[in-house]
Amino acid sequence: VHQLSQRLPGGDKLSDSPSDARQSWVIWDLPVRLFHWLVVLLFIASWVTHELDLMSWHKLSGYSLLVCVLFRMVWGLIGSTTARFSSFVRGPKAVAAYLTSARAKHARVGHNPLGGWSVVVMLALLLLQCVLGLLTVDEFGVEAGPLASHVTFEVGRQIAGWHKAVFNVLLVVIAMHIAAVIFYLLVRRQNLVGPMISGRRRLSVPPDHELIVQSQARAALVFGVVVLFVYFLVVAL
Amino acid sequence: MKRRWSGAGALLCLFVFAAVASAQVTSSAIIQTRITGFRDIGASFKNIRDELNSGRPNVAHIRTAAVTIDGYAAHIPEWFPRGSQPPPRRAPSFFDMVMSWFSPDSRNTSVNLYESHAKPEIWSDAAGFRRATQNFQRESARMRQVAQAGDVTAIQAQYRRLAATCTSCHSAYREEIN
């Protein structure tokens, strides 16, 4: 499979020419960025369509969100370096070290040890929310998720309660996520939104490890498989 | 003499207490009855929905559910006697708010919890509520007939018409749960 590898440039060459010192690196690949902003749009869309009682659009939005989340989970296993769980899911010691040495310059790129866990939590909550939505039943027993025929009315109503609860928890976690981004912008003077749009970040020191960007053909293949999986889950089951 | 009067007073107190207590028991009993009934109606609606969505609907199941719904529909006028308003609720605490996140009917889904969300309009606009009830009864009777006849397309159309009477009545006479 084609891989685009960003090799670390020679150290002495960098120090010779200060204009080249802040080199631009691809830290977020296109699939990760598309995933991020699609989830933003689909989360808002799911919220609005529920409030306006447009349930067929709410369902469509939910299925799309499920596709995005499942894609991101697979991409966390076989995607580009910074997309992989193995690159950002760290133990409690690493998180503690990150929190206590917060002022130190981190040459690492990608999610920090704390941010990595927030990614895991948000992905898990979004996945849970989508699965609960598939089984949710409304108060009339009329509108329901595509898999609701596998549960009783009472169970479906309880699941509807959890669907609502997880939404509220998601709102809290998303608020914390946005607060962290604002903290980085105002206190650390580091814009995290720009790189999530352009994918690039200028670094004065090269990243501490090689950044491999996987081909978009691989991403397209994973996406196709996930779309088929969700289609069969929703229609065939 | 004095003793007799105090005895009569005690007896009177007992009667008043018994009357109030029995009124409360009756009221909470009727609330339980109607909530159980409406839950059963919801379950029957879901049964019809599941059949219609299955691709190969079992008309016998639809028939059973339609008979159940129509049976309950006849009882709805008895379910809301005067004095069966939901008891005044204390101001919700933070704990209540968090707990309410976990239930779509604010703690009403658990089988042994019965919290009425009946709006006061049921009693203040009794004529309107009667009309809404009659709409439901008319459509549920038609649903029963259509299910008996067994034409799935007709069942589908009548199911939508019947469901519309639920939503319109709930939006006017049932507290929206957020």
Image (tube, rainbow, N blue to C red):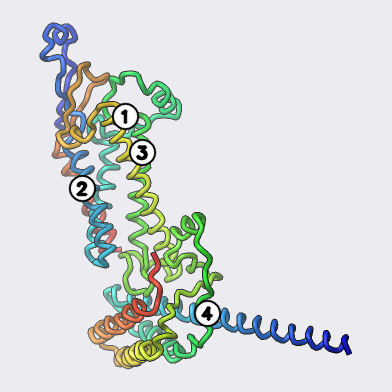
Could you tell whether A120 is left or right of B161 in the image?
right
Query: Which mark is on residue B31?
Result: 4
Q: Position of residue A6 (x, y in %)?
A: 16, 23
Q: Amino acid at mark 1?
A: Ser
Mark 3 or 1, nearer chain start: 1
Residue with the mark numbered 3: A118
- Dot 3: chain letter: A
Could you tell whether A208 is left or right of B108 in the image?
left
Q: Position of residue B101 (x, y in %)?
A: 43, 58
Q: Is residue A62 above or below residue A210?
A: below
Marks 1/4: CA distance?
A: 57 Å
Q: Nearer the viewer, residue A118 or A80?
A: A118
Do dots 1 and 4 share one subunit? no
Badge 1 marks a residue whose secondary structure is helix
Pointer 3 with pointer 1, Cβ within 8 A: no
Circle 4 Cα neighbour tier, 10 Å, few/some/many (<14 / 14–19 / ≥20)? many
Marks 2/1: CA distance?
A: 23 Å
Residue with the mark numbered 2: A38
Badge 3 marks a residue whose secondary structure is helix
Q: Amino acid at mark 4?
A: Ile
Q: Amino acid at mark 3?
A: Ser
Name the front one of labels 4 and 3.
4
Q: Is residue A181 above or below residue A109?
A: below
Q: Position of residue A26 (x, y in %)?
A: 17, 28
User: Quarter of the image holding residue A221?
Assistant: top left
Circle 2 Cα neighbour tier, 10 Å, few/some/many (<14 / 14–19 / ≥20)? some
Marks 3/1: CA distance?
A: 14 Å
